[in-house]
Image (cartoon, rainbow, N blue to C red):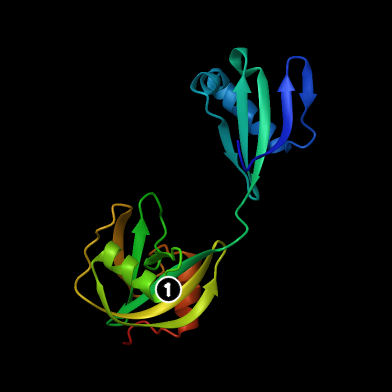
Amino acid sequence: MSKWEHIGSESPAGGDLSRVPSWVEDALSQMYAKDMDVFRRACYEERPIMLKGKTYRYAIGCGGQAGQYRSYYRRKRRTSKRNRATALVVREGKVLLVRDKGRRRCALPGGAIEGMESGIDAVKRHLRRDTSLKAQDAYLLFNHDSRVNRHHVFRIDAVGNVRLLNEELSGYAWWDGNPALPVRKSVREIIFKAGIVFGQQ
């Protein structure tokens, strides 16, 4: 349980749950009401029960018969933002978006900047690897902070047809601003900040 802070324990002899939020205990009670073996399986599989709150993630480790011995842990959300190379590709007044598997909202293409890699190299690599598009020209527009990412936004002139090569992507769209398409908040913010007008080159 590295990087996790121990915040409480519980056993038939007692314990200290003063630092454990009440909603965590309520969630466990509801899980137990639906499936009485939830703690037994957690003990047998030696995997903690994971719960996610708005600010912290919680893990409950179980031991003993039917999970009567429990240890509670809390892990803070990542505070530092991830540097992300983000591609703004516009064709015929539409912006290229991609969708990750299991996600409802679309995002701009791109990904993490690794090690000593430059932002421009990263955005070209992600664009080619994910969509098969080849960047002919790329230049940095601005940096934009979202909740978890620091986007290094590059305007890209790319050639080729989109063909998804990354198995983690489930689809793509050339977005014309239609509100029916669910997109991430950062997409709208970046497009507005870049001064993109849908329907114009």
Q: Is residue 35 visible?
A: no
- Depth order, front residue of 58/23: 58
Which quarter of the figure is the C terminus placed in?
bottom left
For the point 33% across and 77% down, the residue is 89
Residue 149 position in % (x across, y down): 52, 65
Is the residue 24 above or below the residue 130 in the image?
above
Does residue 56 sit above or below 100 in this rendering? Answer: above
Q: To which quarter of the image does residue 110 belong?
A: bottom left
Instruction: Tell me the quarter of the picture where residue 173 sits.
Output: bottom left
Q: Is residue 139 left or right of residue 75?
A: left
Please indicate, yes or no, whether residue 195 appears anywhere in the rendered image. yes
Q: Nearer the viewer, residue 128 or 40?
A: 128
Other-residue count near label 1 (Cα within 10 Å), few / some / many at <14 / 14–19 / ≥20: few
Q: Which residue is mark 1?
A: 118
Instruction: Residue at 61%, 12% (x, y): give it.
Output: 65
Q: In the image, what residue type sits under mark 1?
A: Ser
On-image quarter of the N terminus: top right
Residue 125 in picture, x, y percent from top left: 32, 68
Q: Residue at x 57, y 63 (%)?
A: 81
Q: Helix or strand or loop: what does disc 1 sit on?
A: loop
Q: Nearer the viewer, residue 147 or 166?
A: 166
Name above or below for residue 93 compared with residue 24.
below
Residue lying at the far top in this picture: please name it: 65
Q: Is residue 151 left or right of residue 101?
A: right
- In the image, residue 45 lies at what x, y percent? 49, 22
Residue placed furthest toward the left: 160
